[in-house]
Image (cartoon, helix red, strand yellow):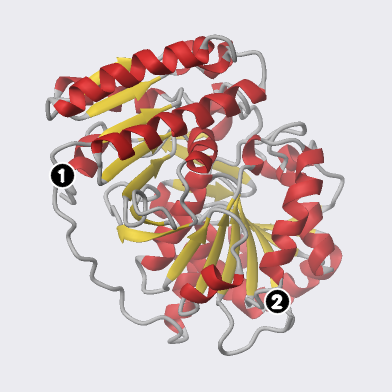
Amino acid sequence: MTPTDTAPLIAYYGDDLTGSTDVMEALAGQGVDTVLFTAIPDDAQLARFRHCRAIGLAGTSRSETPAWMERHLTPALAWLRERGAALCHYKTCSTFDSAPGIGSIGRALEIGRRLHDQDGVPIVVGAPQLRRYTAFGQLFAAYRGEVYRIDRHPIMARHPVTPMHEADLRRHLGEQTELDIGLIDPVTLADAEVDARVDAARANHAALLYDVLDPASQAAVGRQLWRSRPPSGGFVVGSSGVEYALLAEWRRQGLVEAAPTFDDPGPVERLAVVSGSCSETTARQIRWAEENGFEGIRVDAAQLADDHQAAAALETAREQAQAALEAGRSVVLYTALGPENGLATLPDGDAAHAIGRRLGGLLRDLVRDQRLTRVVVAGGDTSSHAIQELGIQALTTCLPLPQTPGSPLCTAHSADPAFDGLQIAFKGGQVGDDAYFGRIRDADLD
């Protein structure tokens, strides 16, 4: 389908749910109405959001195998291509963690390139807004005020599923695909003949990694993405740095109006959080919550993953959470306090998926029984599988959180009245300051 004036500016597939809401926040916060579907919608669901200029589809490919991607990612990207958007984006985590057998970005690149019949597929990972930077093909990411090369990052270098042992992203992708990947570095972006050099590189490489270090290089990359998009709609791979770069160009061309004002949803008395995250960042947030009025409830990860023990573990956790909520207290139910005692101890990815689904079912029951209006799911993979239990068909942005970008408060849209209008936040493991759960409870922007 050829893009038209009424077609979306961009359509995207998020490789996990938190990454998908990250893109939605980046776009909606700058005046691009965006809807995120949790599965391919029917015609009626799609028509409800016909005004949106960006359409997202939340997926789980970050925690899936290449064979799964061929079966499930291929039709999802094909559906997005049929929306007629100017660009179709396969959204990765800004830390680019992936592996040949799990969450292969290389395989996603191959699938999207094949569907779009496109050479020179852009890859954009750097996003200064998230304190992620790429320079001469190397990825750097911040942690607690310091910037680390990704293979020396205190968290990502020892991720329990996809640890990052290589900072050169072309070498990293080289373990996942045989496609030739070129580089547009800061020197090239600053060259007076940058357009000609980019066009030559596009013709000679299957894909091109664009460096983003700062606002100037980000704007230059956005111009190249928009200038070089194919007439029939192009394909691009990368983090929400793709959207941040494009927004700079869209503003320059007058395609995006002024950023909107979001209504303050106000605080809630009770907040329920479920967490399958193994991140030290989330561990600090759980400890902060316990020290600031939340009831902390530990749920054994091994029991939750076991088909024979899960029911009893869930019932115990449910009873504790119900009692705390009925007493007017917020709760945080968690399976790990950091990387040493979480998913790394589980036998396989299926166990992690099961934990996500069962935490989602637990949260579903708490929302129904306690008539909760605001909840949080922590953990990227956890969120992707938990939402399948909540009966939510679509999400829109309720409140961006500029002090912790990538983790907005969302509004749920559902055929089930218990979940239609529910305010829900999905938090990636590395996202947010220590007081994040309190900020969501209080709708605190300061």
- Camera-near label (2 vs 1) is 1
- The residue depicted at 80 percent of the width and 61 percent of the height is 113
**Is residue 220 visible in the rendered structure shown here?**
no
Residue corresponding to mark 2: 233
Mark 2 residue element: loop
Mark identifier at residue 161? none
Relative to 381, 283 lies left or right: left
**Residue 264 location (% of width, % of height):** 17, 60
The amino acid beneath tag 1 is Val
Seen in the picture, residue 440 relative to 160 is either above or below; the reply is: below
Seen in the picture, residue 322 relative to 403 is either above or below; the reply is: above
Residue that sits furthest to the bottom in the current view: 5
Distance of mark 2 from mark 1, alpha carbons?
43 Å
**Residue 18 location (% of width, % of height):** 47, 45
Q: Residues within 10 Å of mark 1 (few under 14, many from 20)?
A: some
Mark identifier at residue 268? 1
The amino acid beneath tag 2 is Gly
Q: Quadrant of the N terminus?
A: bottom right
**Residue 109 location (% of width, % of height):** 75, 53
- The residue depicted at 57 percent of the width and 67 percent of the height is 221
**Is residue 322 visible in the rendered structure shown here?**
yes
